[in-house]
Image (spheres, grey):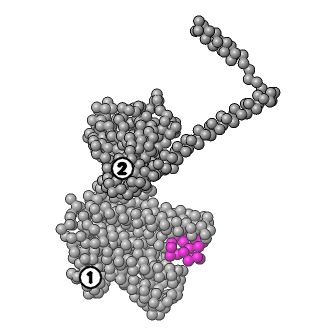
């Protein structure tokens, strides 16, 4: 009977609820007042509950701080912390461990993540910020340093994960392992590949290790397998805190290996809290992973697209390993005579060849000589920026002394190399490269084109004949000596304004055109004939200098500011560096038996500047800005190229550039 009556009451209640209509407000004042008081009570209850939760959190933090303060100076605690014995169930150890982690390991981790472009290639650094948790990855119980390079076979088994979160409550996390450098053949680039995804892993301050079986493995682990021919692969581990403060579980989601981590994290509202990574390259053990685990034939790639991490060419683009091996065939060959008496030509550098100066490296001597000319350029900028003069009498003596010292040191370096047994292909490249930079220290265009053209043709001739020809009147000796005496004469009697100088220059031009130019072409013709090569095929190689000289001439003759606003020195230095790169590349090609270089990117500013100036597109201000940018570009490009080439030469030949290594440390390239 009781069950029947209960059933009847329930039936009546259901009928009442289905027919009940909520009273409208504004009709019965008593009802409105009661409803108002009920809502106020609900609001107070909610505020009290929120306040109590905030108070609890504040009390927990206060307790944590007091517990740390109470034991922070305990000798046993400090000894344990210093030796890595942390009991993370106690607040003081959690505090000390977090301090130790943030003091050094966190800085190293962030530095390597950024330097090796894991961030931002994988995640936005602004979203990651400073990771609040320490993620450690261990392979076969060996803890990995972030960014370390391992053998792929070391990660054949599933890694062990340790996540120190520095919060007391247990939260759920998702662990993802990603390969950032999987080759994408169709797009000729790289893409991400998921290797492992495990969700719902519980971690807390006292629970830093968790069995994978406690979580939900959404994607089974596959070992690293960098393909043959691909570059170094970066394998990243990211620990995400799951939604709702780590309380919400992730269930029944599909995860494929070709996902993008950013999109995966955004879709499931995951917050990154810990990161780590290692790197790996292909070896034979990788093929076993393809055959046994992936059930695929091991791929093999050719030249993969370069993972460009800077704006400079690679070392191999400057000088390849195969080119360096040709340095074994190097043999310096020169033919030189001089009109000067033998005692005068040999006077330069007699003391430097003494045993007491054996420590001086030949290249250091060359560089020291060039520094005198650089010092003269600074004097020119300060005292005579328009190159018109007149300058103080001592300035001309400074120019003469600078050229004489440069010539002296330039002659000494070869003697020093032979005396100390340090002759090398690097010495010829260094010496002639400095010579090329030195040619633009004069403001007369005719003399500049005369010196650069003869130097270019001599270098072109040496490339094809293998011999450096220096005739009876050559630049390093006779011409420089004549220039030194001319500077001294200017210092004594003042700047020259004589028709004799024009006549001498005219005779020099005729001698170069009908003498030096013809001899160079004739020697190249004979070398081509002996080697059964076409002489006509070598003539287009001269167009590089024609383009250089034409660009300089057009820009200077149509410029609106170079002469009028005293920017000639800046232009000459810029064009001089460009010429130095052109000639140095030819010398490098000669030493390493590479093809003749027909182009250098440093020509671009000269050609563009000449075109803009010719068509009147420059104002005085924009031309100066373009000239400064061109100077910075060619300077950085030249010295980057020079440093890379010097480093590769030194490494291959087993020598130092600016010092003389002990004889027992020197070696020949094998």
Circle 2 or circle 1, nearest the eye: 2
Residue depicted at x 41% and y 69%: 580
Residue 8 in sight: yes
Crowd around label 1: few <14 · some 14–19 · many ≥20 (10 Å): some
The front one of 149 and 320 is: 149
Q: Secondary structure at mark 2?
A: loop
Image quarter hosting the C terminus: bottom left
Vertical comparison of 498 with 406: above or below: below
The front one of 25 and 472 is: 25
Residue depicted at x 52% and y 87%: 390
Q: Is residue 178 left or right of residue 572?
A: left
| Numbered badge on residue 352 | 1
Q: Secondary structure at mark 1?
A: helix
Q: Which percent across, then down, holds residue 556?
A: 54, 72
| Range drawn in magenta | 553-571
Q: Earlier in the sequence, mark 2 or mark 1?
A: 2
Q: Which residue is mark 2?
A: 146
Which residue is situated farthest in the right direction here?
27
Which residue is situated farthest in the bottom direction here?
493
Residue depicted at x 27% and y 35%: 288
Crowd around label 2: few <14 · some 14–19 · many ≥20 (10 Å): many
Query: Was residue 668 drawn as part of the magenta stretch in this picture?
Result: no
Q: Is residue 475 left or right of residue 342?
A: right
- For the residues labelled 2 and 1, the Cα–Cα distance comes to 52 Å
Image quarter hosting the N terminus: top right
Residue depicted at x 35% and y 47%: 87
């Amino acid at each position: 009977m009781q069950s029947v009556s209960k059933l009847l009451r329930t039936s009546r209640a259901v009928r009442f609820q289905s027919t009940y209509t909520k009273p409208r407000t504004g009709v019965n004042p008593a009802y409105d007042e009661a409803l108002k008081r009920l809502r106020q009570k609900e609001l107070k209850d909610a505020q009290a509950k929120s306040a109590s939760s905030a108070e609890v959190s504040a009390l927990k933090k206060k307790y944590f701080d007091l517990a740390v303060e109470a034991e922070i100076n305990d000798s046993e605690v400090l000894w344990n912390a210093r030796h890595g014995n942390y009991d993370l169930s106690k607040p003081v150890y959690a505090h000390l461990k977090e301090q130790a982690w943030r003091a050094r390991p966190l800085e190293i981790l962030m530095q390597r993540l950024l330097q090796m472009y894991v961030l931002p290639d994988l995640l936005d650094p602004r979203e990651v910020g400073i990771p609040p948790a320490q993620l450690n990855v261990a392979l076969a119980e060996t803890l990995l340093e972030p960014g370390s390079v391992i053998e792929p076979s070391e990660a054949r088994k599933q890694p062990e994960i340790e996540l120190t979160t520095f919060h007391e409550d247990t939260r759920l996390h998702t662990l993802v392992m990603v390969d950032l450098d999987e080759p994408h053949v169709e797009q000729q680039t790289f893409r991400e590949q998921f290797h492992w995804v495990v969700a719902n892993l519980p971690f807390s301050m006292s629970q830093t290790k968790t069995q994978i079986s406690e979580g939900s493995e959404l994607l089974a682990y596959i070992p690293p397998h960098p393909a043959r021919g691909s570059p170094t692969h970066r394998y990243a581990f990211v620990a995400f805190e799951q939604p709702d403060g780590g309380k919400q579980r992730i269930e029944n989601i599909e995860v494929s290996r070709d996902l993008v981590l950013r999109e995966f994290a955004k879709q499931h509202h995951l917050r990154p809290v810990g990161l780590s990574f290692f790197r790996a390259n292909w070896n034979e053990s990788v093929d076993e992973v393809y055959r046994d685990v992936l059930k695929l034939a091991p791929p093999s790639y050719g030249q993969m697209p370069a993972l460009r991490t800077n704006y400079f060419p690679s070392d191999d683009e400057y000088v390849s390993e195969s080119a360096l091996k040709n340095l074994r065939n190097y043999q310096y060959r020169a033919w030189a005579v001089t009109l000067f008496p033998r005692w005068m030509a040999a006077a330069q550098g007699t003391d430097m060849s003494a045993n007491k100066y054996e420590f001086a490296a030949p290249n250091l001597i060359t560089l020291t000589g060039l520094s005198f000319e650089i010092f003269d350029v600074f004097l020119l900028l300060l005292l005579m920026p328009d190159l018109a003069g007149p300058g103080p009498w001592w300035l001309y003596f400074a120019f003469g002394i600078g050229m004489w010292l440069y010539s002296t040191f330039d002659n000494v370096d070869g003697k020093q190399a032979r005396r100390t047994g340090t002759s090398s292909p690097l010495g010829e490249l260094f010496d002639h490269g400095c010579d090329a930079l030195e040619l633009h220290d004069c403001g007369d265009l005719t003399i500049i084109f005369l010196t650069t053209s003869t130097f270019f043709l001599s270098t072109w001739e040496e490339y094809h004949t293998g011999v450096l020809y220096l005739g009876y009147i050559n630049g390093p000796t006779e011409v420089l000596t004549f220039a030194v005496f001319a500077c001294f004469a200017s210092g004594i009697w003042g700047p020259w304004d004589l028709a004799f100088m024009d006549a001498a220059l005219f005779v020099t031009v005729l001698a170069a055109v009908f003498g030096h130019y013809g001899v160079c072409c004739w020697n190249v013709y004979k070398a081509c004939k002996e080697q059964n090569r076409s002489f006509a095929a070598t003539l287009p190689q001269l167009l590089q200098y024609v383009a250089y000289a034409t660009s300089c001439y057009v820009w200077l003759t149509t410029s609106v500011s170079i002469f009028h606003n005293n920017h000639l020195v800046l232009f000459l230095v810029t064009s001089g560096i460009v010429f130095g790169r052109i000639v140095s590349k030819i010398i490098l090609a000669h030493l390493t038996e590479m093809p003749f270089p027909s182009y250098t990117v440093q020509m671009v500013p000269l050609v563009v500047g000449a075109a803009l100036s010719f068509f009147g597109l420059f104002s005085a201000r924009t031309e100066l800005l373009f000239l400064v940018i061109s100077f910075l570009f060619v300077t950085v490009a030249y010295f980057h190229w020079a440093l890379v080439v010097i480093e590769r030469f030194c490494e291959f030949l087993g020598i130092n550039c600016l010092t003389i290594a002990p004889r027992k440390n020197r070696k020949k390239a094998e």
